[in-house]
């Protein structure tokens, strides 16, 4: 791979703290910031980067705070905002970008404030509306799109459109597709499959040719050779992997108590997917369209492999511990690779993948699927939207701030109103201040990955979970959003939603993909009634940059009540809510199945008793991991803790030829896969698979003896 062999677009944080569009050829000298948009929202925030006709279009927030369409050829001089004359005064608000031939289609808002289907050739003069969608205003859901038979299909707010990119070839195919979730689209030959109203449908692009195919609530529809694979629930209530060639679908699996198969990804000769259908936690599986085969037997059930990135005839994927794996679709060809912890899926560049790590010290890496072929290229803080010119892919990961999800009803002086319909000045009922006017309403977006403990995954509080008719309906909050609990005498307490998860009445929302979240502010800090439950208003928690409009600063804001962290009070509340929900007692095995992986070779302990484990290494390994079963305590009913936990180390002793080195919980010997030290319990928990820093073994001489002092969970999934 040479420095001029690719041009990668991505969004990232710049030195001014704003999010802009960047481009790189993989070298520091070839990395440049393409935009420098200054606004009140913290930068351009480029999104939905989509390649067409040798260039890329993307959405971004301009200097006036409007969401508009942008175009780039990969250079600063060739990056500009497209401003068609007939766009809405508050912004075009393009969504659902999809390439059709040498044009781009998207939904946008016209000068009358109505949503329509638009097209662009990459110029302002060539950007215009093809069809106005009847009775559809500017506030719409994010469309889903697919190409089939050379035409684009766009599903948005219960409407299905089909277009060949011209006004004459654009048709409103259906106007009433009631569904609880956005429909999933997938081509099958020249036709299209989609889900709506609990059914799988097939269309040839005409009203007469749009008919239901099967009474299945299908999702994750994925085109494969000869048909479409998807997930759906069978007649017994179990999630299965299904296949259709356009006729009646049939299930390929016969799982019981499985999570729905997800991340269905075609590979040469097979198709990969994730599920826990084998009863051993989430694993990677493959299918040839007839049989299904588990590819991994990860040492800790529930390590949740994710983010499949095909490269050539193989694919890469990660685990929750950050480990990188490679697979050719066979069990023998599925192995772990030593490397950095990647934040999500990457983009393929021939037999190489480009991937990014997360956080402020993040970087862009190139890998061919081998340890020696994994190279750090450039620094890329908070990189997202990785898109190659001309190939394209996306990588966006961020945790959501304390927020409500769309549809949440907030009690106002005129009754309950969905939060997305509230406006500044509306008066809402609060716990401490009575009726108070809203100062601000903001919205933001996050992308949920496949991990069950993904930080952006919302918390779903079932109706009645907190008390009689509280909440009155299911309530969805981000994990950091606090609920207010009165104490009868004082101000009560604020408790983050994440500390209430019990896996039954309060659980992590299982969905994936992009989410929109909303928040509101009053003068001061208070709690509003959301679906009848008291939930905090905005306070400055450092996440203001994640909203479309900056919230009020409100410096020195006094909390309306003390905020509780993990501890005796929150554990007692969690147990009370578990009892109310009738949650089953924790089940499973107390055996953590603790062992070492020395250069991928499992090593069982020579001695294991009362939390002490002793191992003998006959050879000095180049890579050493501590592996065990793992669980998310909040979901398994052990404690209100959403971390994935394996074992908690109190100490490590390494003995070799008369010398002894001891390491406490704060020692740097603990590398990837270890949680930060627990200051109260003085433990260093693993996430199920954790790596020791190899530098501490580099000068060691075999044989080595390792002794671990470890705490374990009361129960693990078997």
Image: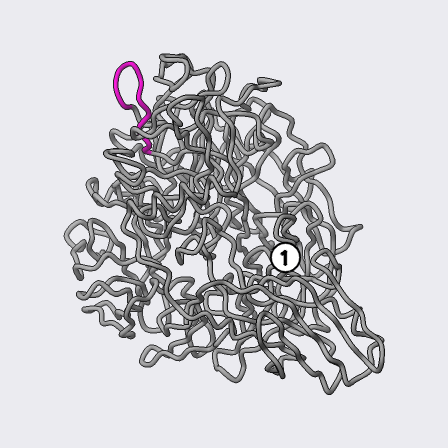
Residue that badge 1 annotates: 683
Q: How is the image coloured?
A: one colour
Image point (59%, 19%), residue name: 553
Q: Nearer the viewer, residue 17 or 129?
A: 17
Q: Most extreme residue toward the bottom, as rendered?
A: 618
Would residue 201 be found to the left or right of residue 436 on screen? left
Residue 717 x, y percent position in the rendering: 42, 68
Vertical side of 557 occupied by 711: above or below? below
Residue 527 x, y percent position in the rendering: 41, 23
Would residue 58 be found to the left or right of residue 235 on screen? right
Would residue 201 be found to the left or right of residue 269 on screen? left
Image quadrant in which you'd find residue 669: bottom right
> Is residue 611 rendered magenta in the image?
no
* Number of residue marks: 1
Q: Which quadrant is home to the C terminus?
A: bottom left
Image quadrant in which you'd find residue 704: bottom right
Q: Which quadrant is home to the N terminus?
A: bottom right
- Packing grade of label 1 (10 A; few <14, some 14-19, many >=20) is many
Q: Nearer the viewer, residue 628 or 219?
A: 628
Most common SS among magenta residues = strand
- Whether residue 273 appears in this view of the structure is no
Residue 608 x, y percent position in the rendering: 59, 77
Read off the magenta span: 407-416
Vertical side of 520 occupied by 106: above or below? below
Residue 489 x, y percent position in the rendering: 40, 21
Q: Nearer the viewer, residue 508 or 96?
A: 508
């Amino acid at each position: 791979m040479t420095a001029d062999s690719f041009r990668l677009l991505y969004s990232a944080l710049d030195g001014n703290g704003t999010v802009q569009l960047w481009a790189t050829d993989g070298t520091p000298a070839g990395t440049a910031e393409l935009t420098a948009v200054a606004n009140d929202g913290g930068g351009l925030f480029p999104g939905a980067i989509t390649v067409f006709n040798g260039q890329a279009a993307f959405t971004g927030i301009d200097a006036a705070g409007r969401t508009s369409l942008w175009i780039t050829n990969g250079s600063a001089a060739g990056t500009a905002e497209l401003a068609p004359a007939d766009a809405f005064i508050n912004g075009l608000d393009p969504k659902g970008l999809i390439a059709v031939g040498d044009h781009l289609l998207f939904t946008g808002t016209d000068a009358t404030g109505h949503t329509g289907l638009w097209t662009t050739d990459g110029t302002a003069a060539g950007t215009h509306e093809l069809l106005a969608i009847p009775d559809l205003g500017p506030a719409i859901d994010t469309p889903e799109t697919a190409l089939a038979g050379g035409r684009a299909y766009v599903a948005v707010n219960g409407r299905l459109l089909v277009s060949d990119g011209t006004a004459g070839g654009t048709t409103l195919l259906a106007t009433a597709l009631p569904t609880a979730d956005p429909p999933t689209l997938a081509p099958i030959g020249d036709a299209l499959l989609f889900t709506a109203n609990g059914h799988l449908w097939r269309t040839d692009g005409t009203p007469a040719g749009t008919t239901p195919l099967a009474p299945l609530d299908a999702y994750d529809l994925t085109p494969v050779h000869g048909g479409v694979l998807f997930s759906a629930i069978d007649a017994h209530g179990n999630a299965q992997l299904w296949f259709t060639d356009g006729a009646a679908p049939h299930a390929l699996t016969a799982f019981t108590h499985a999570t729905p198969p997800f991340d269905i990804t075609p590979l040469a000769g097979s198709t990969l997917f994730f599920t826990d259908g084998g009863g051993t936690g989430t694993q990677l599986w493959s299918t040839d369209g007839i049989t299904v085969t588990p590819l991994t037997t990860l040492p800790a059930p529930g390590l949740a492999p994710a983010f499949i990135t095909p490269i050539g005839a193989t694919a890469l994927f990660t685990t929750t511990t950050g480990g990188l794996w490679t697979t050719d679709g066979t069990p023998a060809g599925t192995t772990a690779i030593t490397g950095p912890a990647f934040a999500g899926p990457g983009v393929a560049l021939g037999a190489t993948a480009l991937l990014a790590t997360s956080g402020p010290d993040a970087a862009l890496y190139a890998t061919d699927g081998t340890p020696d072929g994994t190279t750090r290229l450039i620094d890329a803080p908070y990189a997202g939207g990785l898109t190659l010119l001309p190939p394209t892919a996306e990588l966006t990961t961020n945790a959501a701030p304390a927020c409500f999800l769309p549809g949440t009803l907030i009690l106002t002086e005129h009754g309950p109103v969905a939060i997305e319909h509230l406006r500044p000045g509306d008066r809402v009922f609060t716990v401490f201040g009575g009726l108070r006017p809203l100062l601000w309403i903001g919205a933001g977006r996050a992308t949920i990955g496949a991990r069950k403990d993904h930080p952006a995954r919302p918390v779903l509080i079932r109706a009645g979970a907190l008390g009689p008719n509280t909440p009155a309906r299911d309530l969805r909050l981000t994990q950091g959003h606090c609920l207010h609990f009165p104490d009868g005498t004082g101000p009560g307490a604020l408790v983050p939603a994440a500390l209430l998860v019990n896996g039954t009445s309060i659980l992590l929302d299982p969905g994936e993909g992009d989410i929109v979240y909303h928040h509101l502010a009053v003068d001061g800090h208070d709690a509003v009634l959301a679906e009848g439950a008291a939930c905090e208003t905005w306070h400055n928690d450092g996440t203001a940059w994640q909203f479309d409009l900056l919230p009020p600063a409100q410096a020195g804001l006094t909390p309306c009540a003390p905020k509780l962290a993990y501890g005796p009070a929150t554990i007692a509340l969690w147990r009370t809510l578990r009892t109310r929900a009738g949650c089953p007692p924790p089940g499973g095995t107390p055996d953590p199945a603790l062992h070492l992986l020395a250069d991928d070779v499992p090593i069982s302990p020579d001695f294991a008793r009362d939390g002490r484990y002793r191992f003998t290494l006959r050879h000095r390994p180049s890579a050493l991991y501590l592996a065990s079963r793992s669980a998310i305590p909040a979901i398994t009913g052990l404690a209100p803790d959403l971390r994935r936990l394996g074992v908690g180390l109190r100490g490590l002793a390494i003995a070799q030829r008369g010398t002894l080195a001891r390491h406490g919980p704060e020692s740097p010997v603990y590398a990837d896969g270890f949680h930060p030290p627990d200051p109260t319990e003085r433990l260093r928990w693993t996430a199920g698979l954790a790596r020791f820093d190899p530098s501490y073994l580099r000068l060691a001489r075999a044989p080595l003896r390792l002794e671990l002092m470890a705490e374990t969970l009361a129960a693990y999934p078997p």
